[in-house]
Amino acid sequence: MEKEVSVEAARLRMADLCARSEQCSYDIEQKLRRYGLGSEEIAEVLTFLRENKFVDDGRFARSFARDKVRFAGWGPMKIRAALTAKRIGNTDISEALKAVEPSDNEEALQRALKAKVRNLDPNDRNDRQKALRYLMSRGFKAEDCLKAVERWRKNDAE
């Protein structure tokens, strides 16, 4: 546990943090707990941050989803699970997933498949299952994964 911090110092630290990077309420709350603040003090700091637009869970969710698709190659199911773990509301999660371009999701799926299948044989059933399991573990929907693996098999046959 870190050294106890005053409410004003915590407010300034969190405002500075939020000005530098997008944060969600849950992450800020956890940091404030580590500072030794009580529930009322945490609520006060979070209210200040929300009123001054330092923290916005909807904005965080959109940024998180966009970055995870583009840079980490995550699918929508994995993004939803991560945002749920951060206690983001279902409405904000749905809006964030809608904001991601379908072409970005498709591109992430193709990048993931291409990376996995370098040493796999598309005609080997076990290798196709490995590719399918991998894509699903990256958070893509089963039907999209099946289509991608089938395209991979057909393209290799040509």
Image (tube, rainbow, N blue to C red):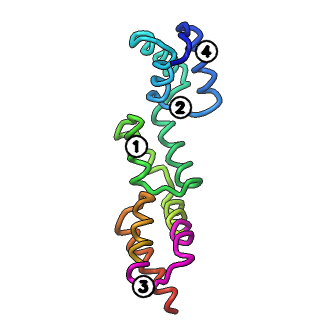
Percent x, y of residue 103: 52, 63
Badge nearest the viewer, 2 or 1: 2
State the mark number for residue 116.
none
Q: Residue at x 40, y 63 (%)?
A: 136
Q: Position of residue 149 (x, y in %)?
A: 43, 76
Residue holding disc 1: 93
Q: What is the spatial separation of the Cα atoms under label 4 and label 1, in whole angstroms?
A: 28 Å
Give the residue at x 40% y 10%.
Answer: 40
Q: CA distance from mark 2 to mark 4?
A: 14 Å
Sequence-first tag of 4 and 1: 4
Q: Is residue 91 above or below residue 107?
A: above
User: How many residues crowd around disc 1 within 10 Å: few (fewer than 14), some, or many (20 or more)?
Assistant: many
Question: How far apart are the two marked residues, 2 and 1, measured between alpha carbons?
Answer: 15 Å
Look at the image and tell me whether residue 51 can be seen.
no
Q: Secondary structure at mark 4?
A: helix
- Position in image of residue 155 (x %, y %): 51, 86
Give the spatial CA distance, label 3 vs label 1: 38 Å
The residue under the point 45% across, 59% down is 138
Q: Main secondary structure of the magenta part?
A: helix
Q: Amino acid at mark 2?
A: Gln
Residue under pointer 3:
124
Marks 2/4 in contact by CB < 8 Å: the verdict is no
Name which residue type carries label 4: Leu
Range drawn in magenta:
111-127
Q: Can you see residue 76?
A: yes
Q: Earlier in the sequence, mark 3 or mark 1?
A: 1
**Residue identified by numbered label 2:** 23
Q: Earlier in the sequence, mark 2 or mark 1?
A: 2
Q: Earlier in the sequence, mark 4 or mark 3?
A: 4
Q: Dots 3 and 1: beta carbons under 8 Å?
A: no
Disc number lying in front (3 or 2): 3
